Amino acid sequence: MASASSSSTVGRGGSSKRKSMKLLEVLNALEKEGPSHGREEIFIAPPDNASGDFTDEDSGDEDGQRDSHLPGSVLHASVVPEDSGTEEEDGLQPPPAMKRQKAVVDPQRVWIKRDIRPNFSSWTPSDPHIEDLKSQELSPVGLFELFFDEGTINFIVNETNRYAWQKNVNLGLTAQELKCVLGILILSGYISYPRRRMFWETSPDSHHHLVADAIRRDRFELIFSYMHFADNNELDESDRFAKVRPLIVRMNCNFQKHAPLEEFYSFGESMCEYFGHRGSKQLPAGNPVRLGYKIWCGTTSGGYLVWFEPSQGTLFTKSDRGLDLGGSMVVKFVDALQERGCLPYHVFFDKVFTSVKLMSILRKKGVKATGTVREYRTERCPLKDPKELKKMKRGSFDYKVDESEEIIVCRWCDSSVVNICSNAAGIEPVGLTSHYSGIAKTRTQVHQPSLVKLYQEKAGGVSRMDQNIAKYKVKIRGMKWYSSFIGYVIDAALNNAWQLHRICSRDAQVDLLAFRRYVACVYLESNADMSSQGRRSRRLETESRFDMIGHWIVHQDKRTRCALCHSQTNTRCEKCQKGVHAKCFREYHIR
């Protein structure tokens, strides 16, 4: 039975006891509660015995899964609220155990009223790797294969064949067939059917010739059901994600290897939905309930995923240095960043992770950090009471600095009171920002400390990545508990490849949808099985059509059909040797 952990949704009943609840009880309680202000998220974990062989078996219908028909093992799973980051900030008090620990362990800090005096070195490094990628002028497929490289493809092929052989099946999967499967998964992000078998139906309203010509339906189903990423004989029983751990290690290595070297990074939580192909369970107020795995993510400020780690809860993840689980994950991300060199990176995160102790640890590592912070994690910093600040004019703030370690805590009053902590950014220069006043019905100028402005500008990397993934995420899911996680990894690799395309492309850039379409089409056309009966021979032109290099429109004596709008034209693309109007030329080469 899979255990589960929940967000603040679960704990809103007001009980102080950590009573074990069932997922079904939580969902029923959410329906009875009525309206709430945000999206309800319940984080679940893989099965307790995730390394067991039974978790590889498919069961039930993979299409059309609904919340009201969840498996009993999931509905009756225990829900364990996590300690990190779910309570309301105002009036929050730390758990009794945390009070006792701080009273014994933490030294008394001396807070004084002055601005911070950071002693970090300035950011000067260049990025030769990105310059090298720019010189190579890689196509979208080439950028995607920086992450799903030949080694990763061969690894998945070998592990899948090994697993099928352990089940007495001679699968004989090849790298060419695996790329076809990946192409179909990518294509499902922007073309989805209620049932995935409709791609191969002969009915004119659903048949998709690109998929049907690439691989047979039964062959795809067989490969997809045996897709595997680890040797079942060598699994770590203490790791709930042992079935996908080798893939996580490989992808983290590739993500970090090709990551743009930047000063500003974001750290936060992402969600991989467990039931991807389903309608969200609706509350009476229309708020969806999302079930899924929590992913700790470190990204650039633009949304490139540098490092990720699926959460296994406090029972399976040991915190260190006296930090909670979230703070420990921040330190692991910083350690991964410093493998590229001990540079003065600046990491941003929210109140789920921030504490004065974490700021002190990162400062000793030579890493800048800024984040919103809860009052009980400020180590008794004597700031003005939030109620007093609210009575003052909008934009008022108070701040103090720890004299020994140069860590500043600032309390700023905007539409609400915000606490923010930093070991690198200070108050000066105080700027002005335009905010809407509901009382005056107009926009007004309010004062804004420098660290607040910097946080607002640089802290959204994880959210940007989530937005990109959510637009066209892989829709095809299996019933294995880790199948949705595989889709998340593919989506993250495509997001990273697109981010590199935006950085490296010297010519016209394509949007995320066109980028994904290009990769899917190339994988399906260039890896299609041409030996099977009924295959139509066709010229595999996609790679050159979308490479955006050397395409010129020229006049032709004989009129032909335009490859895009199919009307008569006397112009053609010199490289593609296809008739195309001047007005259709650009769209033909990006669709």
Image: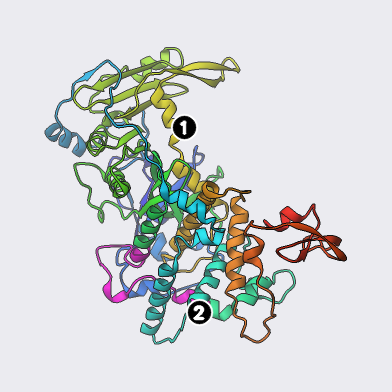
Which of the numbered marks, if any, corresponds to residue 457?
1
Name the spot of residue 258 as percent of width and height, x first: 42, 53
Q: Residue furthest top?
A: 392
Residue 375: x and y in percent read: 30, 28
> Which residue is at 51% across, 53% downward?
135
Q: Look at the picture and state if 200 lies above or below 127.
A: below
Residue 393 is marked as none
Callout 2: SS = helix
First of labels 2, 1 by sequence position? 2
Q: For the residues labelled 2 and 1, say whether their Cβ atoms are less than 8 Å apart.
A: no
Quadrant position of the C terminus in the picture: bottom right
Q: What label sits on residue 222 in the rendered view?
A: 2
Residue found 41% across the figure and 31% down from its top: 455
CA distance for labels 2 and 1: 47 Å
Residue that appears at 34% across and 71% down:
230
Which of 97 and 164 lies nearest the eye of the viewer? 164
Q: Is residue 324 left or right of residue 534?
A: left
Is residue 489 among what the camera can see? yes
Q: Nearer the viewer, residue 211 or 300?
A: 300
Q: Dot 2, crowdedness within 10 Å: few (<14), some or many (≥20)?
A: few
Amino acid type for the residue under numbered disc 2: Leu
Name the kind of residue labelled 1 in the image.
Glu
Residue at 32%, 31% (x, y): give it: 374
The magenta stretch is 221-247
Instruction: Pick the quarter of the image with the N terminus.
Output: bottom left
Occupied quadrant, residue 584:
bottom right
Of residue 406 and residue 292, the one placed in the foreground of this image is: 406
Question: Is disc 1 surrounded by few (<14), some (14 to 19) or many (20+) residues within 10 Å?
Answer: few
